[in-house]
Image: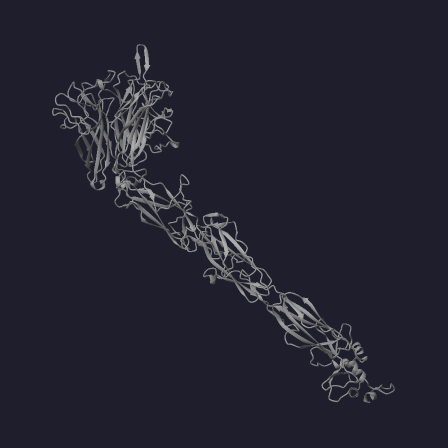
Amino acid sequence: LVRRAEGQQMAALMGGHITWRLNDDFETSRNVTWTVRSAWHTSDFAYSGTGTEIIIGEPVKFPADSTITYGDKFGKLRIKTESQVFDFENEWIVDHRQGDVLEGSFVVTMKIPTGSYVNNATMVLGSGNTMSRSQSTVDGAGATVGVAANGGLQACQFPGPTPTPCEVYVGNLANINTLDLFVSLDLPRPEETAKWYYGPHNPTFPRVRNRASPIPFNRPVITVTQADAPAPEPLFPFPAYDLDGLPYVRTYPALSTPDGSGNTNILCANGATLTSFGCNGLVSGGAHPLDLPPFEGYEFRFKTSDKVVSDNNEFYYSLTWKTFDGLNTVTSEILINFCKAVIEIGNTEIFDRAPEWMTLDSADPYSGNIVRTLPNTTVECSLAGPCKIYAHAAKFDGSTGITTTAGDSPTIHLDGPAVGGNVTDQRTLANGVNVVEYTVGPGEGTHTAEDIGKYFSVCFYATSQVRCRSVPLCFKIKIIGSSPYFIPPTPPLVNLGDDLKIDEITEQAVCAGFTVSFQIRAQDDDAGEFIQINTVDSTGDGQDLFAAPYNALRVGNFSGESNPGFLDVTYTLDITNGVAVDPVTRRTTFAQDRIICSQAADTTLEARYRFGYLPDGSFRSVTKCHKIHFSGPPTFITTANRLDGTPFGQLFGTVEERMRTVDAFIGQEKAITFRTQDPNHRDSTKIFFLSDPGIPNGADTGVSVCEPQVLPVVWDVNGVYSECSVSSRTVRWTPNNESDLTRNYRICAVSRDDVSSSICPSDKMSTEGWYGEEHCVEIRVVLPEIIWEPESKVGHTNMTVLNAYIPCAMEYLVQASDLSVGINNSAVIVESPYSVVIENTTELPSRVTLRSDVKGRNATSTIVYRAGRGDEGRQDVVCLQARDNWFTMTAGTYCVVLRILRCAYCVEGADTLQLIMRDTIGDFNWLRIWVANGNDDGDPDTQLVSNPDDILASGQYDKQVVNIGSLYTVNLGESLSELAGRFQTTVKKLLILNPDVSEAGPLLPEQELCVVPCTDLPIIPVDIPVDEAIVA
């Protein structure tokens, strides 16, 4: 309190606070700017003599005869450091006057010595330097207030309150000596922790992060009206904020504890106890939460139900408040003017209701239904402006109803200076609601880029025909700059969700085999700010496009050095950068489509030293996300064992190196399947056959068929379903034995996906899709390779003589085979399907038949030659060939001579030497045959008979032959009779043994005859001794 002289009018300090902010160059200058905000109540500053100068926008000056100690200026500011005290004369500048209330502030800058931090500041107002008091005073009811031990008022000790608010009655504050009142501030010492420092661009030269104290926006005097039950206690505002962006700004009465209020008359808006941890109270486990979401001030209730005061409306409660930002505290002094709403007229009490603040349920501020709640009082106004704020007030005739009082509409007034704007409209609606429009922005309160991040408060109060006015309604207005935004050539995007914005229409393709680079560019419209762009992989599968194995690059000017800023995403999609190729099947698999999200931030902190929306002090753009679609052409694939899929020579290489030659056979259908896969499972593929070189005549090319399946992928253990990224097409062809005997055919195919032609810069792109590699398969027609087998009696030498013997049916083995083989689609050697046919090329002799025993690629036939008595010496010729079943190849025609030998007999099952002798010449002397076969004659067909009772019988092909007699070669001029006499036989027997010889015909030289000698010996008489007969 300040008074000029005894008995004169005075000025009363009604409240104030001290805030600080480190200068922008604090790290080098060590300068701190202090702002002292205070309000005074005076009925008249015009003292006797020269009047005190009170000019809005200029310092208050007192006359020369003033008793103010510090010259003609109003008060002083005392700042203490660890070792020094600084006193500053106060050039207190008035910025608002409303009735008896003057509001203003002064600003002073001081340098803090190196190594020292401010820890206390004191606003000293008055003429003395101590808190001594020499007299007591009385309260509003006339009761005496004792003097405290330190000389201060017992119920009004400064700088902090008592649990019961100090009651000050301005009208009764006479006869008080001049005194000092102060408001103090503590600035904690910065600690070497991350929360105190900021400096991502220059970590070796960190900036102090906590650059400003919290700033309260309280009104110096808050008028509250006693409520009538059951109406709630009246609300009053106490807005606050923190330029540093610290998220836990909260206000509470001094002396509050985590569990209780420092002033029992102050409640939370919901009626709960207000503690030093705000209005959220305790949580599980007894912890005290910081207020979430971040509070930048509260609305509180002032408890009036237990107040017993006079009808004097100049009765005040003094409150000391704390505003805490999580690090620092600012102390504020305010006065609550309690307006008694009950008026006694005689024996009647009339409740005099003050105007109330309310809202409308419509977006139109001038229409809608009344809602008896306070409006949102935190407003962000763009630097570009203008920004409209609307306040609505009405009188209500009941404690709970919403019917306005007819004929008593309130009037809204500014409560304090018009900051950053002006009232641009005010009107009363038909329902009695008074509306005021306050416009912030160009034309009303122009701001510059230097104002970005600043806060200011605009307060209103409402009056009516009654004595009590409303509580203040304060809007906390923050000037925000422009958020950065993306500009071309950033690929356009479509917002598909609240959290993630992915461009499905113009996906950014990364094309196999190409280096793609697309630019993300952003700018900010605020002068002096630069752009930072942060682009990260947001796919969420633990992989990163900008790390191995993808190794995409981020290059450009995106770290806060330019505006606009740009970031180029550069990536090469190949086998070393995120492409998986199976070395066995050739299946190429791309990684999951990547989602990269970019956010642009400006450099609000560096430019303004004020924080924006975020702890790093920057305004940020919306998040822009690009879906990186890996695109590549389809490739032909096979299987691990190559039993299915596209035939390959080498799996990798040129077309010629990859080409596989497969074999086809005459008359057998050849099916060749081409199978392809696109590396992106979402794409669809088709296979086409090239017109050059074309396909064989008569081939069926089929159609391209999708093969739905679950494909294995690294990012999902269950695989991913693909409808048509894998497709196949089969060509079928049967070579014929006329035009396809000596030709090789090449079939070439190409596959195509369904990717748009605008996606990738490949010359194989078309309007229909991306054509992949060409792949060829060569078909070689394999002809039969017919041979006569070594065991065959036919096929080695033409006119080979084959001996025959009577009386057996002679059988001669004939064998021929096809030796041809081919290579199938799986590169496996397979036998040809041809069959060998053994057939005679001339008419068979009457005694010859050709029996087919085994058919197939190894054929067996038998020449059956049956000769009888009388065929000795006969010869027949049989000619055969071996060919394939398609008449394309033959092993050649060979003839054999079937010759029935003389003097030889084919032993059959029951034959004995005696029977053979009887059947040949009618002689029972078997000794002659035994003698004829007792020695090896060199003929492999005849057997050596050692035991006349044990001769071998013939098998199917192994004939057992015995000699009947001896072969004699006829000389020139010899005759049958001559020979019969010579060999002691008869002509008849010679003719029996040689049925092809005519008795009348001459014998030919070199002609062979069968002779059994000694078959015509004389009969020996029985009376001649044997020895004599033998001698004879």
* Residue 956 x, y percent position in the rendering: 71, 71
160 vs 905, left or right, is left
Whether residue 555 is visible: yes
Quadrant (top left, top right, bottom left, bottom right) of the C terminus = bottom right
Q: What residue lies at 23% left-to-right and 41% top-to-bottom?
A: 27
Residue 985, horizontal then vertical, whole percent: 80, 85
For the point 32% across and 47% down, the residue is 566
Nearer to the camera, 88 or 640 = 640
Comparing 603 with 136, the one in front is: 603
In this picture, residue 464 sits left or right of residue 944: left
Q: Position of residue 795 (x, y in %)?
A: 64, 73
- Residue 495 locus on image (x, y percent): 40, 41
The answer to whether residue 160 is seen in the rendering is: no
Considering only vertical position in the picture, is 336 above or below 987?
above
**Image quadrant in which you'd find residue 868:** bottom right
Say if 282 sits above or below 712 in the image: above
Figure quadrant of residue 386 = top left
Classify residue 956 as left or right of residue 395: right
Q: Is residue 600 left or right of residue 159?
A: right
**Rendered view: 914 above or below 153:** below
Tell me: residue 691, above or below residue 357.
Answer: below
Quarter holding the N terminus is top left
